[in-house]
Image: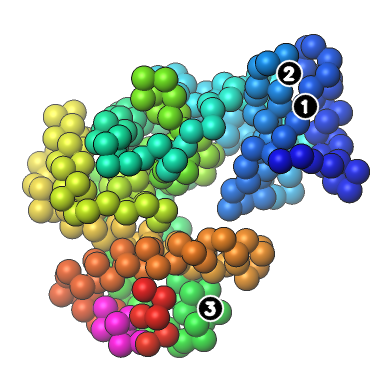
Amino acid sequence: MKINSDSDPRLSQLEEWLTAVLPYGEFKLEVASSDASFRRYFRVYQHEHSRIVMDAPPEHEDIDSFISIAEFLAGFDIHVPRIFAKNREQGFLLLSDLGNTSYLSALNEHSADPLYRAAIDEIIKMQLAPTAELELTAYDDEKLRDEMKLFPDWFLEKHLSLTPPPELDFVFDQLISNAIKQPQYFVHRDYHSRNLMLGPDNEVGVIDFQDAVIGPATYDLVSLLKDCYIQWPQSRLDSWLDYYFEQATDKRLLSEVDRSTFIRWFDWMGLQRHLKVLGIFCRLNYRDGKAGYMNDLPLTLNYVLQVTGRYPELASLHQFLTQSPTIMAIK
């Protein structure tokens, strides 16, 4: 996509900075992607080589966390973008280019097994990494609850004009308890098919990790396997869950945890995430003008209904959801 810096002061600043840090003079700049935040990404071409430049407005984004986490993950053999140049004051980073092939574009019936196993291997590596030096925020009661409040605030009230049911607080308490009782490790926090890049020999490139926290063992796994942008049959999910469980048990990440407990952790962690995401997608639409995420509401809602319909403790929420014609019209 061609860009025009005449009406974009930050883009003009970015071009000036690139002129100063790139070694060979002329370059071509193209839009690479944007995400659900205020960050933008551009691809910089110069003499048949390409790099990625991140534009993260400092009043909205902090690139320090990206820098420290990128350096940390690279030290444990996680394939993340290499940082060539940085300007903390302006919020600019010049990064290595992990390519154009996202997991989402590469996944199909034949590629899914090796790609998901490779992505699970990366989760295991991240969870084995000692995190004390990073001083990451804990995924605690307050943070988990604040995230889930996006569901009544933006999905039920703003999007559907529905009054939240009184049982929501009880459900939130249950989901928080489920999350906190799990072993706590490094959590990418948005580990899904749009944030994983496919490199040579199925190498997994990991991006968008700057919001990482210390949190529940199943969080990144459910982000990956119950992805809001792609769905797989339960039989395939079961095989990938078994693969993670065996690896994590072997490496003592899940000490003395039986499979049924692990599956419950996984399902309920997914419910916490998907309630949050329903709210986030609506907020992106109404507050930020990013309407495309509304197309992903049906799959995300379907994940919620699967779990609330499976556990008796969640029956009241399931009843509220399924008895609302407005909600079921989304599905």
Three-letter residue code for mark 3: His
Does the magenta stretch mainly form a helix, a strand or a loop?
helix
Element marked by disc 2? strand
Q: Quadrant of the C terminus?
A: bottom left
Q: Would you say residue 254 is visible in this rendering?
A: no
Which span is picked out in magenta? Answer: 318-324
Which label is found at residue 44?
none
Residue indicated by mark 1: 28
Three-letter residue code for mark 1: Lys
Residue indicated by mark 3: 159
Give the camera-side residue of 270 and 295: 295
Q: Viewed as shown, does residue 283 lie left or right of 245?
A: right
Q: Is residue 270 above or below residue 209?
A: below
Which label is found at residue 46?
2
Element marked by disc 3? helix
Q: Are marks 2 and 1 in contact (CB under 8 Å)?
A: yes
Q: Which of marks 3 and 2 is nearer the N terminus?
A: 2
Q: Viewed as shown, does residue 178 lie left or right of 330?
A: left
Spot occupied by residue 56 in the image (x, y as percentages of width and height): 69, 41
Residue visible at 24% across and 58% down in the picture: 267
